[in-house]
Amino acid sequence: MLTIPLHNLSLESPGVVHLGDSKILPWHEAAEDVQGAILKTTTREWPFLLQTPSKENEQPRRTLDRVLTVFKLFKDSLVLSVSVFVNTKLVDFPPHYTHWLDADRGLPPFHLDKKEETEFARFWEEFLEINPANFAVYRFHLADYRSYSVDRFTDYVEPLEYLLAPDSGGGEIRYKFASRGVLILGRDKTANARRDLYERTQRCLRHAICNSAR
């Protein structure tokens, strides 16, 4: 069983949130030996912990990547972790997750109210098996851990390019990127809204290309 201390998660209900074979539990619900192992390495009590089964042939870091990506996909916010434990043994301490702990970043809490907890449990079951090695997933996951906003912006555009214009090597990438984006994101919108979306996606990619060329 993997235990992942979660930073900046806020839940409306104080109890355990069940996610199939995984669960989010408040600190006081964790076993004493798990609490002791965490306190030996982080010297603090974490408000919430996530416990999830170890996957066969998967490194704990990859499991952590999947877990944090699912949180980020569910809501436009971040849940952070700086360590992973197998039972009571610290097995990974990923340094790139600590950037948002800087005082000047101002990361807001990732809050789930009672209704959202039920929705998140269903979302978890559907998307937990997402492949963190997929290029789009990988860049999406790492974007917010970059030190500068220009790098984060580019990292978010790259997954969209990968998904919307995988044939961009053939040219006309801005047209392909924007037109396919509108087909997906604007299918329920008015003609004016789709036109605005088309123009904004073209500008988005243009800025990303310029930033990458610097």
Image (cartoon, helix red, strand yellow):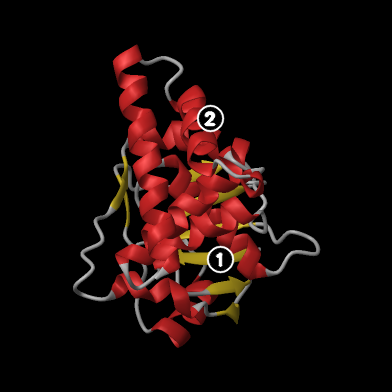
Q: Secondary structure at mark 2?
A: helix
In the displayed structure image, the side of residue 98 where residue 141 appears, left or right: right
Mark 2 or 1, closer to the camera:
2
- Give 123 or 97, whichever is nearer the viewer: 97
In the picture, the disc for residue 3 is: 1
Quarter of the figure that contains the N terminus: bottom right
For the residue labelled by badge 1, is the local secondary structure a helix, a strand or a loop? strand
Q: Residue shown at 51%/65% (left/top)?
A: 4
**Residue drawn at 42 percent across, 47 percent down:** 205
Graded by Cα atoms within 10 Å as few (under 14), some (14 to 19) or many (20 or more), the crowding at tag 2 reads some
Where, by quadrant of the figure, is residue 90 drawn? bottom right
Q: Residue furthest right?
A: 57
User: Where does the image place residue 78, in percent across and percent down from the top left?
Assistant: 37, 55
Instruction: Kindly identify the amino acid type of the residue bearing the numbered disc 1.
Output: Thr
Quick one: label 2 or label 1, which is nearer the N terminus? Answer: 1
Q: Position of residue 36 (x, y in %)?
A: 48, 80
* Disc assigned to residue 182: none
Location of residue 201 with respect to 155 vertically, above or below: above
Mark 2 belongs to which amino acid? Arg
User: Is any part of residue 190 visible from this angle?
Assistant: no
Please name the residue shown 47% across and 80% down the image.
Answer: 95
- Would residue 75 be seen by someone viewing this image from the given angle? yes
> Residue 97, how many percent across, how many down?
43, 72
Q: Is 162 on the left or on the right of 76, as rendered?
A: right
- The crowd level at tag 1 (other Cα within 10 Å; few <14, some 14-19, many 20+) is many
Percent of width and height locating residue 61: 62, 69
Tell me: residue 179, above or below residue 202. Answer: above
**Residue at (79% x, 61% y) in the render:** 56
- Return the residue at label 2: 180
Q: Give the image quarter of residue 6.
A: bottom left
Mark 2 and mark 1: Cα distance apart in space: 40 Å
**Residue closest to the eye, 14 or 59:** 59
